[in-house]
Amino acid sequence: GAVVSQHPSRVICKSGTSVKIECRSLDFQATTMFWYRQFPKKSLMLMATSNEGSKATYEQGVEKDKFLINHASLTLSTLTVTSAHPEDSSFYICSARGGISGQGGKNTEAFFGQGTRLTVV
Amino acid sequence: DAKTTQPNSMESNEEEPVHLPCNHSTISGTDYIHWYRQLPSQGPEYVIHGLTSNVNNRMASLAIAEDRKSSTLILHRATLRDAAVYYCILRDGNNYGQNFVFGPGTRLSVLP
């Protein structure tokens, strides 16, 4: 099946610094990527939707200036957490979907990265 | 988005079948039923999906009620590796760009 690779899997950074998380679709072109955030013992919460070549659409309550999303190519989207603070510590997960050959489109499964655990100290 | 309800948690013994229920009484005619699972510290993993007919794959079976207001994910022989949170998600087949909306899911524990 299609693979989505997320990097890094784990990062620790100092408060006030910025962290970039990459999400790559390895064997298909992802026209749309989704970024989720997950707190311990909680479910995934959608942060934003990014379409290749256009600005991301952020969910209500998500600061676009804090969580910068770039989807510059059909295989790569990045999430940058700017000026990170301890409350930004969380598990971040990306998901990709796109024109996967042979799978039609309407009910295609989504493919998720393995997640990035961010700890801000 | 049509909503789903699942039990918060379930327990199973290793090598026994597990039936994970999901209620979706407000499902629309174009909603597909998807199941994903999330192992600890990993991203969600696709399990199975269907529209009206029961579905089988190497991971599991999906039994869909005739009125489509509920479905059951069946793991035929639970292993310790199946311990995860299982999410039942509806997705409109006419809205290709729609994201997956995750509820709390069912936390499955598998006892040796």
Image (spheres, coloured by chain):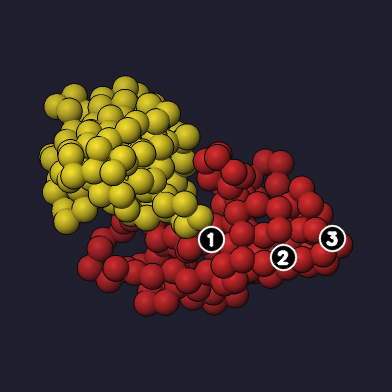
Earlier residue among tags 3 and 1: 3
The amino acid on which the numbered mark 2 sits, given as a three-letter code, is: Ile
Q: In this figure, which residue is indicated by the disc labeled 2?
A: A12
Circle 2 Cα neighbour tier, 10 Å, few/some/many (<14 / 14–19 / ≥20):
few
- Front: mark 1 or 2: 2
- Residue at 42% across, 77% down: A26
The quadrant in which the C terminus of chain B is found is: top left
Mark 2 lies on a secondary structure that is strand
The residue positioned farthest toward the front in the image shown: B112
Spot occupied by residue B102 in the image (x, y as percentages of width and height): 46, 41
Q: Quadrant of residue B26?
A: top left
- Determine the residue positioned at 42% across, 50% down: B38
The reply to whether callout 1 and callout 2 are in contact (CB within 8 Å) is no
Q: Spatial distance from mark 3 to mark 1, Cα to Cα?
A: 21 Å
Q: Quadrant of residue A73?
A: bottom right
Q: Which residue is mark 1?
A: A115
B96 lies left or right of B21: right
- At horizontal 13% and vertical 39% (from top left) the residue drawn is B53
Of residues B84 and B5, which is closer to you in this image?
B84
- Secondary element at image label 3: loop
Colour representing chain B? yellow
Disc 2 with disc 3 on a shared chain: yes
Q: Which mark is residue A15?
A: 3
Numbered disc 1: what chain? A
Residue A44 is situated, as x and y percent measured from the top left of the image, at 53, 45
Residue B69 in percent (x, y) is at 26, 25
